[in-house]
Amino acid sequence: NYCCRWRRRHRKSRGFVFKCIVIGDAGVGKSCLMLQFTDQWFRSELDPTIGSEFGSRIVDIDGKPTKLQIWDTSGQELHRSISRVFYRGAAAAILVYDITRRDTFDDAALWLKDAMESAPPNLTKVLVGNKCDLSDRRAVSYEEGESFAKTHGLFFMESSAKTAQNPFIEAARTVSKKIEDGVLDSSAMNGGWKLYDDPKPIIKAMKLSIYRVRVVKRRKS
């Protein structure tokens, strides 16, 4: 109807901001994936996350400035109940396992169960087999990950923070499409995303972010 068409046209001039949560067992590389995406920085060893860590980055998704607010949660059993709090208001969840550790893949079903019970409806879910640069030590085949994702309705990919392959852009594209299609409702308090009528501040921040990344790369070289 006319109202729906107007809303779709109006969205085209707006910028998106949405919340993404990263979940999975301890040591699978969640923090490394986030840091590679937000800061273009890789470190093979990081201290375990306690509670959660936050990062953000503004990217261009189909011509729209899109800000991802990313919550990296602890994978330790001790902090599992705390991590569930961060599902509230999430538009996307990145479920990570380590392809070199079979136990982290086996636990994916438990993390998915938590997400289904604690997160808002229409949550975008991405299953990520991390550390694909270590394929010579692989304990979980690509086909196993793909089959699990297909069974549970998840998007699937393998990634590596070391080689800068990451799942966040794909999650952003999926969420953006759901917004355009009206699957995600901005009137819902726990929709996990917001619209900006004037995207100029986001575009300005995007340019500053790109500049900062270039400076970091020059310093490293």
Image (cartoon, rainbow, N blue to C red):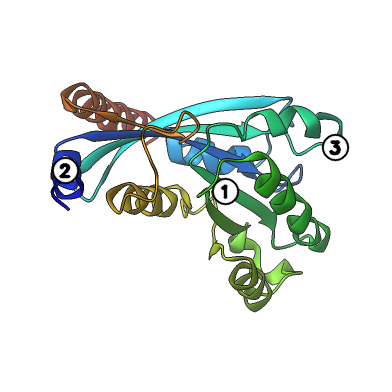
SS for dot 3: helix
Residue 81, x across and y down, in percent: 79, 31
In the rendered image, the vertical position of residue 181 relative to residue 41, given as above or below: below
Q: Neighbour class for label 2 at 10 Å: few (<14), some, many (≥20)?
A: few
Residue at the location (78% across, 60% down)? 101
Residue furthest to the right in view is 78
Please give the label number shown on residue 207. none
How far apart marks 2 and 3 lie (CA) works out to 42 Å
SS for dot 1: strand
Amino acid type, residue under disc 1 in the picture: Ile
Of the image marks 1 and 2, the number of the one nearer the N terminus: 2
Residue at the location (80% across, 55% down)? 107
| The C terminus: image quadrant | top left
Please give the label number shown on residue 12. 2
In the rendered image, the vertical position of residue 101 relative to residue 122, given as above or below: below
Residue 188, x across and y down, in percent: 44, 33
Please give the label number shown on residue 94. 1
The answer to whether residue 58 is seen in the rendering is yes
**137 or 90: nearer the eye?**
90
